[in-house]
Amino acid sequence: MGGKKPYFAVILIQSMYVGLFMLSKAAFNDGMKSYVFVFYRQAAGTIFLVPLAIILEGKNAPPLSFVTFCKMFMLSLFGITLSFNISGIALVYTSATLVAAICNSLPVITFAFAVLLRMETVTLRTAPGIAKVAGVMVCIAGVMTLAFYKGPYLKPLFHHPLFGFHLIQKHQVHASSGKGWIMGCFLMLISQTFWSLWIVLQGRLLKSYPSKLIFTSLQCVLSAIQSFVVAIAVERNFYQWKLGWNVRLLAVVYCGIVVTGVTFYLQAWVIEKKGPVFQTMSSPLALVITIFCSSFLLGEMVSLGSVLGGILLVGSLYSVLWGKSKEENMNDGGCLSGAAEQECKEVKEVVTTYCQPSSIVM
């Protein structure tokens, strides 16, 4: 039974991510503005993380220089605040299924940034190198498919969704107009790009400030402040800021505490037991579960284009992961210099900790 625990853990992690997609979309369907939601989510995460950081790492926290603080502020601004707000808008225009599909492109985009910053190398004369480049190309093809090809809608599994009573009509309006759907796809891609760059740059910043829990908490605090500024500038209707005993409050609490706290711990445990590749390879589970739950809970109509695009993105993920694993087995990182190899390890650790749908989407 003990050997099966990591498998149950990754299923639970991906199911929690699906809850993130479903509740976020349900809150937006209920009329909650994405900007307000992002602020409340980050505020809830701050309330949860800061006490833990003080208790667990407060005494041993390294000093924080002004330069490091400024770097954290900029990382939080682009990698969290802007990324989360853009992905929130994308979720309004598209569907939970599409968002779950595009999330699989995050490791591929992160790999591309690592290559540009010379943290990764690509050798086209080897099969692993070709697989990694092919993965990037397939990722682009998957995003293009999601954006420009819808195809027929698949027959819904359930005709009486629990949430999102008006979602089907809204979704059909967006699909028929085309512009909203395409814009949502590319907004989601921009959000993933911001988040990928944040992952790569964060690997370097963790060198100067290695306390991960304090580091994460500070970024959560900064992003909550930044998100409040964005939300109050865009939405000044007091009614939109009210949280009653409804799906809005449930979404905020779930995303701020369960996703931020519980999945962070579970991911670290799984990586320790089975390694980072095992954790990353489980991410397509979220897409499969989302397709089922979006029909049952939200009444979303899944198009053939979404399914095909999702398959391409999952294929690109596995292509890059296969190339990475083969290179490590063949040369044990010998193709890189010592400094570059160390940077790769640090980026890999950060990617497998943060580079999941929970972090990336909302």
Image (cartoon, rainbow, N blue to C red):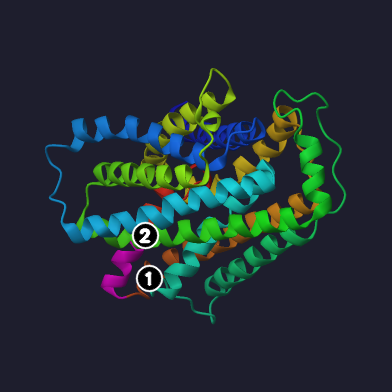
Tell whether 153 sits left or right of 234.
Answer: right
Magenta extent: 337-346
Q: Residue at x 56, y 27 (%)?
A: 248
Of 327 and 65, the residue lying toward us: 65
Tell whether 104 sits left or right of 65.
Answer: right
Q: As displayed, is residue 113 above or below residue 52?
A: below
Q: Is residue 54 magenta?
A: no
| Residue extending furthest toward the bottom | 125
| Circle 2 SS class | helix
Task: Residue type at mark 1: give it.
Answer: Met
Q: Residue 205: x and y, percent? A: 27, 59
Q: Residue at x 39, y 62 (%)?
A: 200
Q: Main secondary structure of the magenta part?
A: helix
Real-space Cα distance between discs 1 and 2?
8 Å
Q: Residue at x 75, y 33 (%)?
A: 295
Mark sitting on residue 210: none
Q: Are marks 1 and 2 in contact (CB under 8 Å)?
A: yes
Task: Using the rendered image of the protein, determine whether residue 1 is visible from the camera's viewpoint.
Answer: yes
Of 244 and 322, the residue lying toward us: 244
Residue under numbered circle 2: 347
Crowd class of label 2 (few under 14; some 14 to 19; many from 20; radius 10 Å): many
Q: Residue 208: x and y, percent? A: 20, 59
Q: Is residue 338 magenta?
A: yes
Q: Quadrant of residue 221?
A: top left
Q: As displayed, is residue 142 above or below residue 164?
A: below
Q: Earlier in the sequence, mark 1 or mark 2?
A: 1
| Circle 1 SS class | loop
Of 171 and 52, the residue lying toward us: 171
Crowd class of label 1 (few under 14; some 14 to 19; many from 20; radius 10 Å): many
Task: Residue type at mark 2: give it.
Answer: Val
Residue under numbered circle 1: 119
